Amino acid sequence: MKIVTVKNQIEGGKVAFEALKAALADGAKTLGLATGSTPLAFYDAVVSSDLDLSALTSINLDEYVGLDGADAQSYRHFMAVHLFDKKPFKENFLPNGKAADLSAETAHYDAIIAAHPIDFQILGIGQNGHIGFNEPGTSFDVTTHVVDLAESTIKANARFFEDESQVPKQAISMGIASIMKSKQLVLMAFGKEKAEALKGMIEGEITEELPASILQKHENVLVIADSESASLLNQ
């Protein structure tokens, strides 16, 4: 696990962008993407670059249950606004939050991931140590699944909605086992509220109570953290 400490999120986005360029030069064809505020500077760097992504495939980590791509709060809409409409890919995959049969949808998404092995996966980390929407207690062996969102996750995401009551209570998430199959993982963490989770991920025991801790077992992880999120680390 390589740890790079940066001054701020903008610098962190640039470091992630350089890692992406290296991965593309090494033949990466499928990008695993994340939503939320953490990767925004990374997406800004991609959009402002001259990179051509039109031959690439993207696979997103998750989507809210009950929202379709036309909903302004959906992750498909988020990705369109911040990346897809500005840097077209060959194809983009996100879970279908409006699927009538959620079990069939999770199996379908597993098949998509199997057909498009992820070369470069962007991750954030939740204050409770979740990656994707894999909340504490999630089995390390799980693939795509329907998640009941933790109260802390709902509260953290409420800032994107008019009020907390509008935040969906469930999501479809790529599983931990699927994430761990990615060739390279790039996890970004910014802000003091991520410090405890980051310390546990890097220096704590590997436990399903802190899902991100499993990344200690991956052979190619780049952690990009600002000084606040890295403030509790012993290194």
Image (cartoon, rainbow, N blue to C red):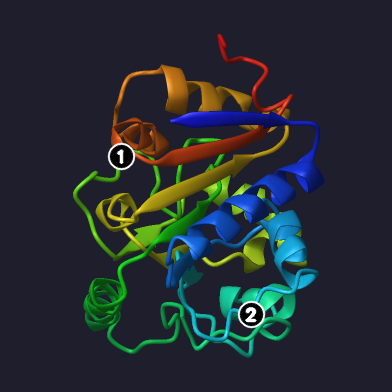
The front one of 235 and 214 is 235
Q: Give the mark count.
A: 2
Residue sitting at x 22%, y 54%: 142
Answer few, some or many: residues within 10 Å of disc 1's Cα (few below 14, many 20 plus, some between 14 and 19).
few
> Which label's residue is closer to the chain start, 2 or 1?
2
SS assignment at label 2:
loop
Choose top left, top right, bottom left or bottom right for residue 133. Answer: bottom left
Residue 38 as seen in the image, left or right of residue 208: right
Q: Quadrant location of the N terminus? A: top left
* Residue 39: image location, x then y, percent: 66, 55
Q: Is there a contact, CB below 8 Å, between mark 2 and mark 1?
A: no
Q: Amino acid at mark 1?
A: Gly
Between the residue at mark 2 and the residue at mark 1, the CA separation in whole angstroms equals 39 Å
Residue indicated by mark 2: 52
108 to 36, vertically: above or below: below
Residue at horizontal 57%, vertical 86%?
A: 54
Can residue 37 be seen in the rendering of this structure?
yes
- Residue 73 at least partly seen: no
Crowding near pointer 2: few (<14 within 10 Å), some, many (20+)?
Answer: few
- The residue singled out by tag 1 in the image is 137
Outermost residue, front direction?
25
Residue extending farthest top: 234
Q: Residue at x 29, y 45 (%)?
A: 138
Amino acid on which the number 2 mark rests in the picture: Asp
Q: Note whether 68 is above or below 186 in the view shown.
A: below
Q: Percent from the top left, x then y, of residue 167?
A: 61, 64
Instruction: Give the image location of residue 50, x and y in percent.
Output: 74, 74
